Amino acid sequence: MKKLVRKTIKVKNNLDARQIAYLVQCAGQFKSEISIEEEEKRINAKSMMCIISLALKEDDTISVIAEGEDEEKAVNEICGILA
């Protein structure tokens, strides 16, 4: 049975290209589907272009959402990079 894990955080830093690449690489290691949600936008955390399009800035409030077999670990890992 699949459930959804969601965690809401504040972004600690503006993200540069290197940090975004690291985030995408990290997300890509998980089997779960991982999304980042900000207001009405929900993007795939495994896509560099999607994350760039979100234009996350310091103190933005976002939700990290994962669904799949390693969802808990995925959410914690991604939140650890961003928060």
Image: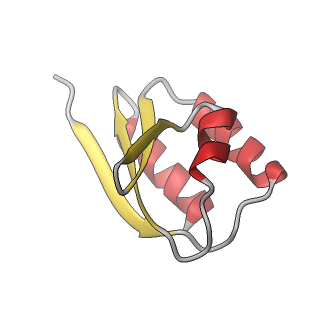
Q: Is residue 38 above or below residue 30?
A: below
The x and y percentages for residue 81 are 62, 59
Q: Residue at x 59, y 32 (%)?
A: 46
Q: Is residue 73 above or below residue 1?
A: below
The x and y percentages for residue 34 are 45, 35
Q: Quadrant of residue 62?
A: bottom left
Q: Nearer the viewer, residue 69 or 41?
A: 41
Q: Residue at x 46, y 53 (%)?
A: 76
Horizontal relation, residue 57 to residue 3: left or right: right
Counting the numbered discs, the total is 0
Which of the image's four quarters has the N terminus?
top left
The x and y percentages for residue 79 are 50, 58
Of all residues, the one furthest to the right in this rendering is: 18
Q: Is residue 70 above or below residue 9?
A: above
Which of the image's four quarters has the C terminus?
bottom right
Residue 73, visible in the rendered structure: no
Q: Residue at x 58, y 62 (%)?
A: 82
